[in-house]
Amino acid sequence: MEILGKERILAFQTEHSWSRKPLAKWAETVEKGSWSHFAELRNSFRSVDYVNGFTVFDIKGNDYRLIAVVIFSRQQLVVKHLFTHDEYTRWNKNLIKDKRKKR
């Protein structure tokens, strides 16, 4: 699977040096992988979730979260955000708040 948005990964690794090895391992697995749907992806990444329209990967246990859009038909994964656990919690709360306002 092709990873789009690698610059976001590199920027995050620069700011969070402890994420380098786990993110490199994650990227290697994704680039070698091929999945037809979310259930297959979950066989390779047990902690992956689908939240508010995004595929959310736990990196390094639960220290980091990688937020992506996966286009299975094109075998592409688009990295949208990378967060620490705390940053993800704030982002997700704001996302839920914004969805409620739009109703």
Image (cartoon, rainbow, N blue to C red):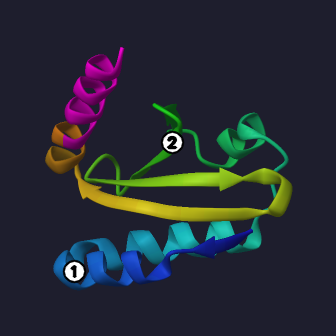
What residue is shown at x 27% (from left), y 29% (from top)? Answer: 98
Q: Quadrant of residue 17?
A: bottom left
Mark 2 closeness class: few <14, some 14–19, many ≥20 residues within 10 Å:
some
Q: Is residue 77 above or below residue 70?
A: below
Q: Is residue 57 magenta?
A: no
Mark 1 closeness class: few <14, some 14–19, many ≥20 residues within 10 Å:
few
Q: Are marks 2 and 1 in contact (CB under 8 Å)?
A: no
Q: Say which element carries label 1.
A: helix
Q: Mark 1 sits on what residue? A: 17
Farthest-out residue, top:
103
Label 1 is placed on what type of residue?
Ser
Q: Is residue 63 above or below residue 8?
A: above
Residue 91 rendering spot, x and y as whole percentages: 23, 42
69 sits left or right of 88 in the view: right
Residue 53 rendering spot, x and y as whole percentages: 53, 36
What residue is shown at x 51% (from left), y 54% (from top)? Answer: 68
Q: Mark 2 sits on what residue? A: 54
Q: How many marks?
A: 2
Q: Main secondary structure of the magenta part?
A: helix
What residue is shown at x 28% (from left), y 75% (from top)? Answer: 12
Residue 23 rendering spot, x and y as whole percentages: 43, 71
- Which of these two is toward me, 102 or 84? 102
Tell me the tag on residue 47. none
In the picture, which quadrant includes the N terminus? Answer: bottom right
Q: Is residue 27 above or below residue 53?
A: below
What residue is shown at x 38% (from left), y 76% (from top)? Answer: 8
Residue 38 rendering spot, x and y as whole percentages: 71, 38
